[in-house]
Amino acid sequence: MISLKYQNLYETFINHYKKVSVNPWHEISDERLTNIYNYLVNSMDIDNDYNFKYFMDYIIKRLSGPEDAHTKFVLSSPIPINFRIFANEVLINYPCNLKGSKLLAINNIPIAKVILELEEIITYGTEGKKRYEIEKNLFNRFVLFGLPLFRDCNELTFKIEKLNGEIIEKKYTKENDYTSEMFSMSKYLYGFNCSYKFIDNCLIYNHSSVQPKFEKSIIKAMNNLRNEDLNNIDTIIIDLRGNTGGNAKLNKYLSDFLEEHNDKKLICLTDYRVFSGGRYALRDLINLGAITIGEEISTPLNCYGNSNYINIDNYWFSASEYYFHPFAFWSAETKEEFQNNATLELLKPLIFKPDIPINETKEDYLNGIDTILEYAYAYSQKKLKR
């Protein structure tokens, strides 16, 4: 059963999606969508925000497939804890006093089983995106209480094994708003964006976000760098890790600066969170001759995107408008352009592989060692001595 409120929200979103997408039925047919809708409304009660979040995420995953991670229903209420996943282990990243502790279960349900339910509703086109979405959704109250496992619960009890082997529990309630406790988690999202440092003959610049709110900070950082004495700098390392996108046009400030120093070796660090506008930065760096070191990223290089956000009765939805292939310098911005110019070759998923694949290890994470950066620095020194 679905209440009239949520039925209207769904129908308004779907009509918006059909209108703006250049290829709305790239994954399933309109008929198949109707069948999925009927299955859900006949198997669950969609009469609150938690269940509606599950309902929308379940549908959007099947509507989007692996090629469209920009179409989404945005409803988030974080609890003050977040995670890093290594292989099959979910480790606590925040709060700091529990960093490295292992999440064993939620309400006595083994975490592996919880993750299986999350996989039913998260949209991803790469293993990196899958990892990132699981990490994010494990601290989203609206997602967790919408899962079938916890739909009838009013409280979540996280069972945690500390580094010393002690087992503890942390509890989070369904109706509590934890916003006031979230300030300290902001660094988890953007790191030290727009910051830079020097290590011997290397300049290391952090380009972890191109969200519009960082434009002035990016400009300031580039101006500051232009005032630095870089005569003894042989290598520039651009740390792209964590860059989930924003406004891709902001990447130009960085690429313009790098073009002024094209005599220096260029290295780009990547990880499983690089997405959307972040992949355009990656494209620009590769075109500038960068050696890429790190992990696969959070998106196929070619995919649907350019989020078209719509507010429906104070609920936010996003639908991908266009199709982009950054390395073919091709995009489709209308249905006609897509139908007339899309080819199987252009649509074949292009998965980024770094020149030198280096994965962050659990051991280094626990010991505060930056696996990828330390390798990149050692690589730069070795190359320079040849």
Image (tube, helix red, strand yellow):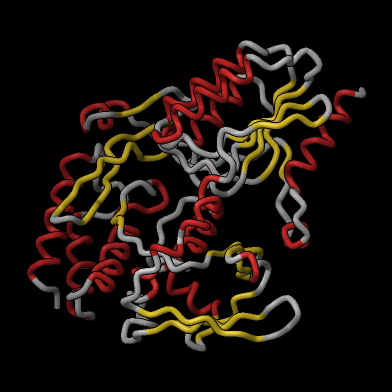
Q: Percent position (x, y) of residue 339?
A: 25, 32
Total count of labels = 0
Up the image or down, 201 lies above or below 169; here it is: above
Q: Percent position (x, y) of residue 92?
A: 61, 68
Residue found at the very far left of the displayed protein:
4
Identify the residue shown where x is 28% and y is 56%.
73
- Residue 122 relative to residue 358: left or right: left
- Which is nearer the eye, 367 or 112? 367
- Which is nearer the eye, 65 or 238? 238
Identify the residue shown where x is 43% and y is 78%.
172
Which quadrant of the view contains residue 380? top right
- Residue 162 relative to residue 132: left or right: right
Q: Percent position (x, y) of residue 290?
A: 67, 25
Residue found at the very far right of the displayed protein:
385
- Which is nearer the eye, 242 or 319? 242
Q: Percent position (x, y) of residue 24?
A: 24, 45
Up the image or down, 141 lies above or below 113; here it is: above
- Residue 285 relative to residue 348: left or right: right
- Which is nearer the eye, 140 or 192? 192
Which quadrant of the view contains residue 43? bottom left
Which image quarter holds the C terminus?
Answer: top right
Identify the residue shown where x is 56% and y is 18%.
223
Which image quarter holds the N terminus?
Answer: bottom left
Identify the residue shown where x is 88% and y is 30%.
382
Residue found at the very far bottom of the displayed protein:
108
